[in-house]
Image: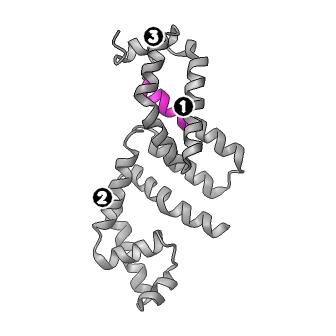
Amino acid sequence: MDFTENITLAKQLNLGNTKAYDFLMDTYYKNLCRYAFTLTHDKGKAEDIVQNVFVKIWVNRKNINSHFIIKNYVYKSVYNQFIDQFRKNKPVIYLEKKYLEALDLVVENDYENLDELTQLVNEEIMNLPPKCREIFILNKKDGLTHIEISEYLNISIKTVEGHMTRAFKVLADKLTPKVDAILFLLYDFKKEMSQLK
């Protein structure tokens, strides 16, 4: 039986076919663990999330129908499981709400390209003019303020602000809102949360 056909896989899962379930695990387990890791930044938690998702899929297999796009279904299930755990473990403050909204934007349509999108953002940052790139990285990756950068590089705050504005303009011109959300996930959230601790 060819489980690569979405309708066949969905129907066989619904019927409780263990071979269909094994195919689902073999096809998606590793990629889902990688995806969950981008959300949790914790290998153990990522694997727990994916395992819980597969258990729930089997327990609720009768709810699966042939209209489900299985690939989207399993990725969205991992995302939902992450959100559930995230909310249980800590109160959602404003920055975390922004983080969740950015995550939602990133995973909304194209789940498996998360690594590719992250790479694209980093490539565009590396393509910035040298001084512009240096200032942007000092601010976004290293968490230095504009004043600290001006003192560190011995340049005016206006020059720092000019380079940051230019960097954002270049990135905004080249990157979609989805990639802009990744920029927030990679840098702003980590930086701002560390300043709250």
Badge 2 is on which residue? 174
* Left or right for 4, reference 100: left
Distance Cα–Cα, label 1 vs label 3: 18 Å
Question: Which element is circle 1 on?
Answer: helix
Mark 3 packing: few (<14 Cα in 10 Å), some, or many (20+)?
many
Badge 3 is on which residue? 11
Mark 2 packing: few (<14 Cα in 10 Å), some, or many (20+)?
few
Of the numbered discs 1 and 3, the one sitting upstream in the chain is 3
Whether 147 is drawn above or below 75: the answer is: below
Mark 1 packing: few (<14 Cα in 10 Å), some, or many (20+)?
some
Main SS category, magenta section: helix
Residue at the image point whose x is 57% and y is 31% from the top? 51
Q: Amino acid at mark 2?
A: Lys
Of the numbered discs 2 and 1, the one sitting upstream in the chain is 1
| 123 falls in the magenta region | no
Place residue 6 in its image quadrant.
top left
